[in-house]
Amino acid sequence: MNYRILQKKVLIPGQTTLLVIDAPHVAKKAKPGNFVILRTSEKGERIPLTIADCDPVAGTVTIVFLVVGKSSAELNTFEEGQALHDFCGPLGKATHIEKQGTVICVGGGTGVAAMHHIAKGHAAMGNRVVAVIGARNKDLLLFCSELGSFCPEVLVATDDGSQGHHGFVTEVLKKRLEEDKDVSEVVAIGPVPMMEAVAKVTKPFGVKTTVSLNAIMVDGIGMCGACRCTVGGETKFACVDGPEFDGHEVDFGELRMRLSQFRPQEQESMQLFQHKCQCGEGK
Amino acid sequence: MSATPEKKTAKKMTPRTDMPVQPPFARIQNYLEVAVGYTEADAMAEAARCIQCKKPGCRQGCPVEIDIKGFIGQLQKGDLPGAYKVLREYNSLPAVCGRVCPQETQCEGMCILGKNPDKTGGPVAIGRLERFVADTFAARLAGGDAACMQITGEAACRMTRDDLKVACIGAGPSSLTVAGYLASLGIKVTVFEALHEVGGVLVYGIPEFRLPKDIVRREVDAMRDLGVEFRTNWVGGKAFTIKELMDEEGFKAVFIGVGAGLPQFMKIPGENSIGVFSANEYLTRVNLGRAYDFPNYDTPIFKADEVCVVGGGNVAMDAARTALRLGAKKVSIVYRRTKAEMPARLEELEHAIEEGVALELLCAPLALNADENKRLASMTVQNMKLGEPDASGRCRPEPIEGDTRTIPCQLVIIAVGTKPNPILLEATKGLALNKRGYIEANPETGETSIHNVFAGGDIVTGAATVISAMGAGRKAAKEIAKRLLGTEL
């Protein structure tokens, strides 16, 4: 199988990149909420990424990633025309989407990309989708126009006030929930602290809140339990039971801790990679 | 049992030929195979010990009833291809089974020479001979028909017919058996594997030091040469359904060999602490991800000075010995019964002890204690005693009330068994499962509740051995061949 990169778009230089991958059999089956696992090379680790978009007709899957460590930095060196070593999917349970009225989709950072696919699914079902997206400043906002193409409202929050609300997405969300009593569900995807904060905001309103957990994974098919997390006091595997769970039931503190499990090794690997790049050894 | 001629047992016989091994101090510094294999002289000497019983017990002890007397007889005559051909008639993976079968409870456990080891020198080392024959035969193969020779022991296989398509889901021992067998009969086989490498438990589970990946690769390469197509990264039930394979893709039959993949945890406090891993995760990182060679390979592994492995099976032994090789200062196996009840292969237990693995017997984990950063610090265990035998015939472990102790450890690896993976099963309508959630399959043919859909291996039996998975694959493959080829066979 040849998982060629058909398009590469640098969304935020050195930080966030979008890739459109030629993977017809994945595109045919992928649903909002699903993820893929890819490897860059024979020596690469398995990297889970939530699908940002897919086109079953063109046979393509779109992924967006943040450069955080060696593997994502290496992925960022790939150019159009090159092929990924492995690309496996779709994985995980698809988002539960039903006709239900107004759904607020909150996205933070790179999470906006994954949220985009879910928002699109809700819109296609005929739900009224309000998108709430946030970033440090307006240049770092992702998928703003794409969301605008099917969401009647795209609410923006920036840390520096350069666009939209000056502050956090949670403040925009709270205001909206106070004004609009017809919201049937809130979907939040982004950094763990953001999802935790969203769940805290929605709790008093009693609104169903769905979060997508970016736990550490190895196989992504339920074989190893690396991604286990506590939801409603029970251990769940994010890869096969999720990745989406009830935000009011998730133990976010545990998730944060578990995400730090390999931090020393991640740093070691990244330093070595940067050193090699500086010495001109390439990848 | 009067198969042994009188004159041969009367005098003291040659003892069993030792397996050459890397010395313990050396092997825990590397990841290379521990048992290096018989030399030709070793093999001939060991084969000569077989007294060619009229009614061989060894064969009854073998789950797939290999003609053991037959292959050793050929070896005694110096006919290596002949020996290989006999093995291949029954066993699709002799190089693997020779290494990983629990011979002491199977063929070797029934060998007449084992009945009175002081006089006879112990049972014939059937597993070691099987390995010798498979390895040596493969090493001498060359030329155009090598793939067919490797798979069947015969010079020529049938040409592949693209109109007869069979799909195997999973690429472990049972599926590989089906693929090799059918490909040699000219049936076009496609193997769908969820992971990025082919081999199933043979590559993600069993470590290099016990089963080198090259052994598996050799088999897979031969199958490719025979026209088998391997599609890695294809998850059954996600990327495709069985119905689609049969209705849209034109597969005439499907074999499900997806293994029993979901790890069991103990449901005790602290189990999600940092430093607690399933054996599946720990071994997959190291074996499939080559984490023993991090950062040359990208997959990281968790290291600690004090390691506890919970369980007494082969997976526990593999995990414990892997932890030693990754630099742990102290590795203990925590098991609720005693050494005698451990289900692990005897050789693995002996090797583990030689290498310095400690045994914490008669105790069961109660809690995993973490520090304020959720990092594992110790394990509290309940001390146990042995009670009456249970249904399995092993003595039931019973807690000694109020008697607990704490073992310091920063890494715990849980190897207490697996459950069926639900992904494919939930996506396949009409597939009947048993009470434990495994697939119901006809014991004679391997056929499931769906016509022309077969299953075998751990997804039918629950976690078992490579040989029994291989045997189930063989049974199903024969039935599939019969249905597809009919009178041509």
Image (cartoon, helix red, strand yellow):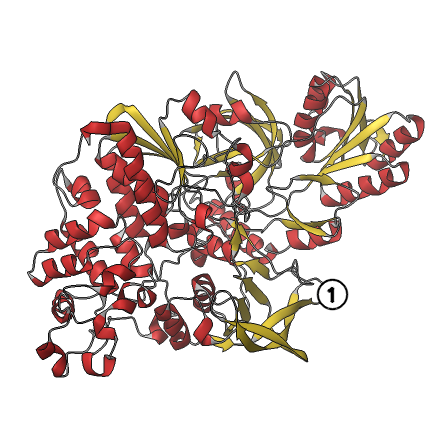
Measured as percent of width and height from the top left, residue B399 is found at: 63, 75
Q: What's the residue at 13%, 45% (across, down)?
A: B142
Residue beneath the point at 43% across and 76% down: B356
Which residue is painted at 21% across and 49% down in the image?
Answer: B88
Q: Is residue B128 visible?
A: yes
In the displayed structure, A99 sits above or below B69; it is above
Say which residue label 1 marks: B372
Q: Quadrant of the C terminus of chain A?
A: top left
Furthest residue in direction front, as rendered = B2
**Chain ID at mark 1:** B
Q: Is residue B172 above or below residue B23?
A: above
Element assignment for label 1: loop
User: In the image, residue B117 lies at what x, y percent?
Assistant: 24, 79
Q: Work out whether residue A197 or residue B62 is closer to the camera in this orientation and state it.
A: B62
Indicate the position of residue A167 as horizontal and vertical percent values. Answer: 85, 36
In the visual, does B74 lie left or right of B437? left
Q: Is residue A148 above or below residue B84?
A: above
The count of marks equals 1
Q: Within the image, what quadrant is residue B401 found in? A: bottom right
Q: Is residue B159 visible?
A: no
Mark 1 nearby-residue class (10 Å; few <14, some 14–19, many ≥20) = few
What's the amino acid at mark 1? Glu
Q: Quadrant of the N terminus of chain A?
A: top left
Q: Residue furthest right?
A: A179
Spot occupied by residue A122 in the image (x, y as percentages of width and height): 72, 23
Would you say B203 lies left or right of B134 here? right
* Left or right of residue B429: residue B478: left
